[in-house]
Structures are given as C-alpha cells and as structure tokens.
Amino acid sequence: MSDQMLPPLTLILGGARSGKSSYAEGLLTALPVPWAYIATAEAFDDEMRRRIEHHQARRGAGWIQYETPLDIAATLSGDAADQPCLVDCLTLWLSNLMHADRNIAHETDNLVGALSKRSAPCIMVSNEVGLGIVPDNDLARLFRDEAGRLNQRIAAVADCVVFVAAGLPMTLKG
Amino acid sequence: MSDQMLPPLTLILGGARSGKSSYAEGLLTALPVPWAYIATAEAFDDEMRRRIEHHQARRGAGWIQYETPLDIAATLSGDAADQPCLVDCLTLWLSNLMHADRNIAHETDNLVGALSKRSAPCIMVSNEVGLGIVPDNDLARLFRDEAGRLNQRIAAVADCVVFVAAGLPMTLKG
Amino acid sequence: MSDQMLPPLTLILGGARSGKSSYAEGLLTALPVPWAYIATAEAFDDEMRRRIEHHQARRGAGWIQYETPLDIAATLSGDAADQPCLVDCLTLWLSNLMHADRNIAHETDNLVGALSKRSAPCIMVSNEVGLGIVPDNDLARLFRDEAGRLNQRIAAVADCVVFVAAGLPMTLKG
C-alpha cells in the first residue's frame, strides 16, 4: 500500500544545484526501505568523483546502490524491478550514451518500454539545459536538442512531472 | 465564433526543444483551417535547413506558409491579417533584426502596433535564453538582454502567456 | 502596519532581463517611503556602469541608496535595519565574494543570521543561472554551483519565493 503513495513514474526536472536530487530523495524515502539508487554517474575524473561522494554522503542507510551508466532499462526491469527506484540522472545517462555512440532513439524506446512494465514507483531526475543562450559548439547544441527531446518523451509517459527551482517544486503534471 | 476559442494574442515561452512549437501548433490547429505559419527562420546553412524541414514535416496540410525573416508586422497586418497566425519564433526574428542592423526598439513598436489592430488570434513562440551562466562574448550578452526585453514587451500586451517545459504548459498570464 | 503588507523575507528569482528587479521594486514601493536600495553592483567597467545607470534611472525619488558589494549582512542589520529593503542582487554579491576570496559558507551564514533578526521587509533579487548547458570553464561551473546553493539556502528561510519570467510572476512559496 505504501507504494500507492507514489505513482509508477515521476519526473523531476531542474537546473544545476536546484535541489532536484534532494527533492526526489525526499519523495522516495517517505516509502519504506529499501530504496534503489540507480546512479548514472561514472567517476572518470576528480571533479566527478567529488560530486558523487557529495551525493552519497547526503544519502544515509536504506539504499541499494546500482552503478548503471548505460543500461538503466535493464536494471529497472531486472534487479530493481520490484524496488522503489531513483534514477539520478537522465541527463548524464544521455551524455554517457552519446560518448558510447549508442543509438539514442533506440535506447529511449527501451527505457520507456521498461518503465511501462513496472508497478513499483520510479523517480527520474533530469536537468533542464535549454534555457540559456545557444551554445557555440556543435556537440553542445546536439546534446541540448537530445536532452530536450528525452525530457519531453519521459514527461509524456510520466504520471507526475515536477520542476524544481531553489529547492522548491512547481507541479507541471499530475 | 471559433476565433473566440483563442484570445487575440498568446505568447508561448520555453527553452530549446521544450516542445513549445508543438504546443503552440496544437492550440492553433484546434481552430478551423486555414492557419497561417509565419516562419522567421532562413535556411542559410545545412543545420538550419534540417531544423526547418523537421518542423515542416511535423505540420500537415491546412497551413499557409509565410517566410518572413524580418517584416512580421507587415505580414500580421497585411496578407495574414484575418488569419489565425503562428509566429515561430520571435527569438530568431530578433537575431535576424540584429544581423540586418535594424533598430530593435522601432521594430518592436511596429510589431506591437500591428498586433493591437488584429482580432484574429495570433500565437507567438519565443525562447527564454537568460537562465544560464552569463555568456563570455559581448554579442551574446547583448542578444540575451534584447531577447529578455522583447519577451517582457510582448508578454505585457499578450492576453495569455504560457511557459512550456518538457512539453508541459505552465500558465503565467491569462 | 504597512510593513505587514510584505513578509520579512521575499526572494525573487529570474533570468537575465526577466523583469525581476522591476517586479521587486513594484512590491517594495507599494509600502510608504523611504525604501532602502542595497546595490551589490560595482561600476568597474563601462558596461556595468551603463547597467547601473539604467537601473537607477528607472527608480525615482524615495530611495536611500547603499553601495554594498560585500557586506550586505552589516547593512541589513545596521543602517538599514528598520527600513524596507531591496537587495539587488545576490548573484552579483556572490560574484563579488568569490573575487574577494571570501568564505562563501561563512558569509551566507552571516547573511541568514542578519535576516533572521529583521522585522522590516526585505526583498532579495537573485539570478537563476543553472538552466543552460554545462559551462566549459571551471570557474563558471563553480560559480553556477555556488549560486544554486545560495538560492536554495535563501529560499529555505524566505517567507515567499517568486520566479519571474518575461515580467510575470510564478509563486514557488508563500
């Protein structure tokens, strides 16, 4: 019944350091333990390592950690299928897909398919990156376009979509 | 009477790939055909050509297309005066004005004047570009300032203003 | 009693040229004169001088001006302690602190402490800078992170938080 407290899919959008991850964790940890943390970050440099550690330190016990830079669909429909999940974050997942030269449209279809089969709640965190000036370089423009498309796609199938600014939620859907 | 379904002026704001154009098209195509599409884009390179074709492919029959990189006021008060219009987008129009060395304040006054004389609905799409870090170069900063001023000016005279994120609307006015 | 028209602390967030300063001034000037204007801008180049003069020209009589690039906590709890205040803006204050190599966490604690002791209304204006693509350079990324943290911290203690886009308010809190 506790799973009824959250719908199957919630998307949390926000900018850098907007408090979106903390907000998402707060939603999930209102449910009974354990909670699955599906991390898309890879510690390939010191700055990223510090960011990951900063996030891990803020979370306490009760979390099952999955390090899943690419295959979050497999984790969501496999080991974590019956667990309340937090995916943090979709934007980094997209970046990882692009670096690995994966087919974005195909991977997004896979993800949407995996989400549609779950009943345990899933909260996905994603960055809004399209509200600044047009980037100078081609790759940044392409990334921005793909990130916007991915957010639209997930928002369309989500039960609830929340935009977080300065730690405060605005409900866009649900 | 169907024109009563939309007020004379609606402004749709959003980031890159936020779904703002699709949302605007959805509003307009709820009215009977024909609909005027006032395109401010010019296909001066391959990337822009692909973006224009992507947008055109998404739209179907029923549209009268106007290619108007600069003189949207003339189109709105001339050939398209009695047609429900979609102007896509103001941000590109501003960029075109700056490249053509037009007087922004004067052109904006003209546009607001033309809009004030219409009774057929007009939907204008515009980018929000001021929510990132301050750009390095002078021209980008100037553009960002002018884009912000233009959005404020149109929002002040609009009957309805909607902010779109991930394809979902937040009503700011109306 | 007029001070009851505004709560002790209001945070106004928005992008560049979003109309956030005008909106904040409108809130404050609904109270009886005088109003304190706590400016964090320093005119260290021509562009900044023009921006400051543009803002000053828009404001009329009734304002007491404080030029406070760094020590806004001292002004808020000192000379301006009993005056309705507008702090414009926190983002520039953060930038000034970083240039002066001050301890951000310590200065933020001081500010929150000073705010907690006031009963006269204070409106703080701040930029949202985290909704664009990840900046290329380290300093811009650090600034973006600190700006996001600062906005979250002030939003947490504010009675009212408003996001302004195209001159139009969206209430996030209060």
Image (tube, coloured by chain):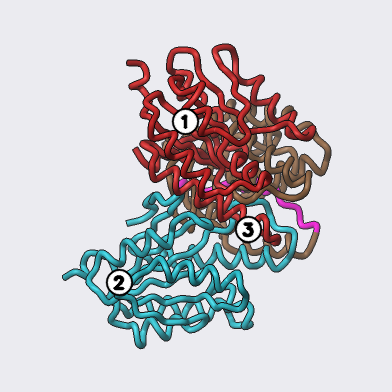
Chain colours: A cyan, B brown, C red
Q: What stretch is highlighted in magenta?
A: B30-44
Q: Mark 1, mark 2: which one is toward the viewer?
A: 1
> Going 62% across and 75% down the picture, which residue do you hit?
A45
The foreground one among A172 and A90 is A90
Quarter of the image where one finds residue C54: top right
The kind of residue tagged 1 is Ile
Q: In this view, does A72 lie to the left or right of A50?
A: left
Residue ID at (69%, 37%): B146
Q: Earlier in the sequence, mark 1 or mark 3?
A: 1
Q: For mark 1, give the secondary structure.
A: strand
Expressed as whole percent of the image width and height from the top left, the position of residue A91 reads: 53, 68
User: What's the amino acid at mark 2?
Assistant: Pro
- Which residue is the site of mark 1? C123
Percent coordinates x, y for residue B78 in the rendering: 67, 34
Kindly report the distance in space between the C-alpha atoms of the residues bearing marks 2 and 3: 33 Å
- Mark 1 → mark 2, Cα distance in angstroms: 39 Å
Magenta region includes residue B166: no
Residue assigned mark 3: C141
Q: Which of marks 2 and 3 is in front?
A: 3
Question: Residue tagged by mark 2?
Answer: A121
In which quadrant of the rendered view does residue B100 lie?
top right
Q: Residues within 10 Å of mark 1 (few under 14, many from 20)?
A: many
Residue at the image point whose x is 39% and y is 53% from the top: A172
Q: In this view, does B162 lie above or below B78?
A: below
